[in-house]
Image: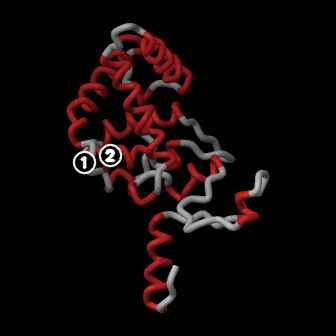
Amino acid sequence: MTMCSEDVKSLMFLNEDEAGTIEAITARLIPGDPSSPGAREAGAVIYIDRSLAGYYSFLQTFYRQGIDELNHLSKSMYKTSFAHLSESQQDELLHEIERSLTDEVPSRMSQFFAVVYEHTLEGTFGDPLYGGNRNTVGWKLIGFPGAQWGYTADQMKLGYDVEQINVLTLSDVRKKENQWAVNGVKK
């Protein structure tokens, strides 16, 4: 498992092994490298964990069963759990599950894959306030300037370089709003 100790300490629902499995899945769905971070670097697993402890708590059993089933499948094919497979083996197993998404009656494993995929997107590209998109790496990856009050006419023109706009999170916007309130400035 590659989660940093700070992330492990912040887990709210998943245990360390479960989080390692989810992190391994997210890292294969949106892979990163030193020059271009992916879901692992964005902390998508932290978003998923916090969501399972809160808003998505109704999916707790579904996740635990899905992780168990994935590890069982991994052990039957490769003799080890999913998180301990090589990246190519992880990809092979996930592609096998992904192919079953087109079945007339999707398997429980393909349903699990679809839910984790959706949550990986949310955790990589959502606002950092919710636990993922650490350091706004997901937004930077796609050139999204984050939560802005508005845009100038120049910024709205086709071809404008959005990297010129400072990336703002919801927390940043709230801080600005609070500063304006203290200083008596209206938006």
Query: What's the residue type where badge 1 is placed?
Result: Ala
In the rendered structure, the answer to whether residue 172 lies left or right of residue 55 reads right
* 171 is higher (above) or lower (below) than 157: below
Badge 2: residue crowd in 10 Å (few <14, some 14–19, many ≥20): many
**Image position, residue 179 (x, y; %):** 47, 84
* 156 is higher (above) or lower (below) than 166: above
In the rendered structure, the answer to whether residue 27 lies left or right of residue 112 reads right
Q: Closer to the camera, 144 or 60? A: 144
**Image position, residue 127 (x, y; %):** 47, 56
* 26 is higher (above) or lower (below) than 174: above
Residue at screen point 49% across, 52% down: 133
Q: Closer to the camera, 104 or 24? A: 104
Residue at the disc numbered 2: 49
Image quarter of residue 112: top left
Residue at screen point 41% across, 60% down: 129
Disc 1 from disc 2: Cα separation: 6 Å
Mark 2: which secondary structure?
helix
**Image position, residue 36 (x, y; %):** 65, 45
Query: What's the residue type where badge 2 is placed?
Result: Asp
Q: Which mark is residue 53?
A: 1
Q: Which mark is residue 82?
A: none
**Image position, residue 31 (x, y; %):** 57, 36
